Amino acid sequence: LQLGSNKSLVRELKSFGKIGGTGTLQSVLNTAAIIALTAAIDTSDGLTALGTETPISLRSRDLGHPPFGGNYTALAEFILSPEAIRTQSVSDVLSAYGERLHTPHGLEEARSRAGMLQLIPDIPYLVSPTFRIQNQRVQPPPTGWESFLNQQAASKNPYRNSFAISNLGLFDSTAHPELAGLWFCQSPMPWGVALYIDVVGYTVRGPSEIDGGVETELGIIISYFEGAVSGNTIDNFCKYFVRALELFAAAGSSGVEQTNALKASRLAELVRVVRC
């Protein structure tokens, strides 16, 4: 995504989140994505829920985990019903999402979903499998796993949740002035979510009187299931996502009064705003 030339965007987004103590930068990004996706999709055919996933680290020195290596990542799930989108405020969603990521209850729930084995389908299948075990081999193909993927491909909703938002954190690139930007991207998986929002922050040289001459920029890449999500939906989502972030940043730079007013707005109101 191209976020313009606003070098203070990250600082303004953080300010928006901190005022009132209801959200981190990650919460702000997630809320903006919820607004953008709701604005981008056609809800006339019945939106049942909007679900987001956020990878979080469960690595703990107290549990003997090594400082690097191994897989200690779990998915924190956050679900909003159509009623919640109509009635909840930006502040409500920022706070609720933050609780999923940072409270003991939220971490315990994410821990219960950890492990790649949960992605392997259990018998019985949605459709009775046609294979059998013969001489310790699956005959004929496809295997149970392949059958599951075929069922996913034929489904009207071939994804686990609406989107996942991953944030690698901040990379100090001030020692690399030749670096023009920084991005990372995950490949969508057949058993994954519909959209992937991959975020990384990186430092750049800024005015010496602000934050010691160091500013932070965001590199954001959107990837999606081709065929499961239309290109028009993705184009609109990207456009509305940038608009929502700019709206939050403008309030964050304006101060407490404007920020509190925007945080009190219902999500549905901001969906209409970003569509304009």
Image: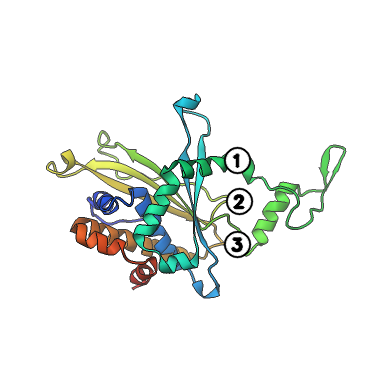
Q: CA distance from mark 3 to mark 2?
A: 11 Å
Q: Which residue is mark 1?
A: 116
Q: Where residue 38 sits in the image (x, y, percent)?
A: 44, 66
Position of residue 110 in the picture relative to residue 244 (left or right): right
Label 2: element kind: loop
Label 1: element kind: helix
Task: Give 225 or 80, whichever is nearer the viewer.
Answer: 80
Q: Earlier in the sequence, mark 3 or mark 2?
A: 3
* Vertical relation: 190 (above or below) 114: below
Label 3: element kind: loop
**How many badges with numbers are in the image?**
3
In the picture, which quadrant includes the N terminus?
Answer: bottom left
Specify the amino acid type for callout 3: Asn
Q: Which residue is mark 2?
A: 191
Which residue sits furthest right? Answer: 135
Specify the amino acid type for callout 2: Trp
- Where residue 222 sits, quadrant-wise, is bottom left
* Vertical relation: 132 (above or below) 247: above
| Label 3 crowd (10 A; few <14 / some 14-19 / many >=20) | some
Q: Which mark is residue 157?
A: 3
Which residue sits furthest left? Answer: 209
Specify the amino acid type for callout 1: Met
Q: Where residue 107 sits in the image (x, y, percent)?
A: 48, 41
* Vertical relation: 112 (above or below) 7: above
User: Is residue 232 in view from this perspective?
Assistant: no
The residue at the point 13 percent across, 41 percent down is: 208
